[in-house]
Amino acid sequence: MSSAPAPSTPPAPLEELYQSVILDHNRRPRNYREMEVADARAEGKNPNCGDKVIVWLKLDQGTVADVSFKVPPGEGCAISRASASIMTTAIKGKRVDEAEALFDRFITMLTGPRTPAADLPADTPELGPLAVFSGVSRFPHRVKCATMAWHALHSALREAVASTPSE
Ligand code: ZN
């Protein structure tokens, strides 16, 4: 008889798409500017790769009113720049607690158990475009490239909240 073995998961063709999203954000980073009036400014460093990033944050009533970043010339690889760029688009307009939740999810995705993109829980829609970085977890020495901007954001969020008491 021809009983089929357990169906195997088809290979994720998304990897290439993810690549192109990352390359696009690297070439044309969003929210790539210095912010003159910000509630917080934080720097991130990844000595392993030589990456640096500066993140600016502005809150309005507990919501991320504006967020931007810059990379010192020649001090950011494609992964780190794209990660910072996509991060800014993901958290703009989010409440502080939502931004912190995204930070947690992103860090867990990259530093937790290896989870192929196809196996990500269906109830994580908020990760959205951020899921393109799930493949980075397979390259441990690149994980910090992707998480650097988020750690800077995390610091900036805490600083901004402390400096702009709301309610
Ligand atoms: Zn890097």
Image (cartoon, rainbow, N blue to C red):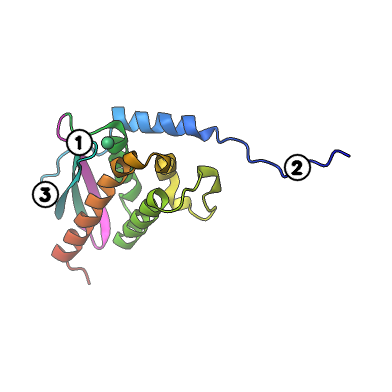
Q: Amino acid at mark 1?
A: Gly
The stretch in magenta equals 59-73
Location of the N terminus by quadrant is top right
**Residue under numbered circle 3:** 37
Nearer-the-camera pick, 164 or 148 = 148
**Residue at the (51%, 50%) spot, across then down:** 120
Q: Quadrant of residue 77?
A: top left
**Residue under numbered circle 2:** 5
Residue 148 screen position, x and y as percent: 26, 46
Element class at badge 2: loop
**Which is nearer the N-term, disc 2 or disc 3?**
2
Tell whether label 3 touches label 1 (CB within 8 Å): no
Nearer-the-camera pick, 132 or 47 = 47
Rounded to the nearest whole Å, what is the CA distance between mark 2 and mark 3?
61 Å
**Residue at the (24%, 63%) spot, across then down:** 61
Residue 68 shown left or right of residue 17 in the figure: left
The answer to whether residue 66 is magenta is yes
Q: Amino acid at mark 2?
A: Pro
Q: Main secondary structure of the magenta part?
A: strand
**Residue under numbered circle 1:** 50
